[in-house]
Amino acid sequence: MDLLWQRPRRKTLVDWPEDVDSRLDVLVRAAAAAGEQTSRSQVLAALVTAVEVRPAVIAELLHTYRQMPADALEADKTREDLPSVRSPGRTRGRR
């Protein structure tokens, strides 16, 4: 059976706040805690494919995101309950 996650790849540039990028790392760590070996791109793909394609749903997600206070993801920085995950390849540096 042909699986979606094995289809040809396309690189996508994402420009978003550093805290959102850190949240993606936390999601990868959460997947590892559940026994999954995954990557940032697989987590993003899973989230994109899981969202219901209804205008009202997308609008509500956007509204919620745009109203989040700057420190909304602050608790992610203290997630000692999740394992560390080393990303393959070069280490991404902070600007």
Image (cartoon, grey):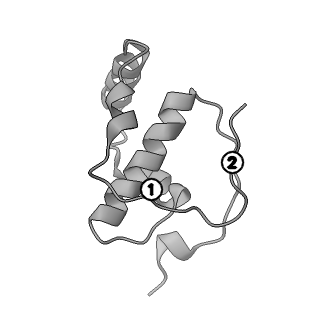
- Using the image as rendered, state which of residue 28 and residue 12 is in the foreground: 28
Under mark 1, the amino acid is Val
Expressed as whole percent of the image width and height from the top left, the position of residue 77 reads 40, 35
Which quadrant holds residue 28?
Answer: bottom left
Who's the residue at 49% across and 33% down the image?
Answer: 20
Kindly identify which residue carries mark 1.
43
> Could you tell me if residue 39 is visible in this image?
yes
Who's the residue at 47% across and 77% down the image?
Answer: 3
Residue 36 in the figure: left or right of residue 4? left
What's the CA distance linking mark 1 and mark 2?
18 Å
Q: Could you say whether the residue bearing mark 1 is in a helix, strand or loop?
A: helix
- Using the image as rendered, state which of residue 79 and residue 60 is in the foreground: 79
- Using the image as rendered, state which of residue 29 and residue 55 is in the foreground: 29
Q: Quadrant of the N terminus?
A: bottom left
- Using the image as rendered, state which of residue 71 and residue 48 is in the foreground: 71
Expressed as whole percent of the image width and height from the top left, the position of residue 6 reads 55, 76
Kindly identify which residue carries mark 2.
92
Residue 33 in the figure: left or right of residue 4? left
The tag earlier along the polypeptide, 1 or 2, is 1
Q: How many marks?
A: 2
Under mark 2, the amino acid is Arg
Expressed as whole percent of the image width and height from the top left, the position of residue 94 reads 68, 36
Who's the residue at 49% across and 61% down the image?
Answer: 42
Q: How many other residues sit within 10 Å of disc 2, few (<14), some (14-19) or many (≥20)?
A: few
Is 35 located above or below residue 47 in the figure? below
Who's the residue at 31% across and 54% down the image?
Answer: 82
- Judged from this view, the residue extending furthest toward the bottom is 1
Judged by depth in the image, the label closer to the viewer, 1 or 2, is 2
Q: Quadrant of the C terminus?
A: top right
Q: How many other residues sit within 10 Å of disc 1, few (<14), some (14-19) or many (≥20)?
A: some
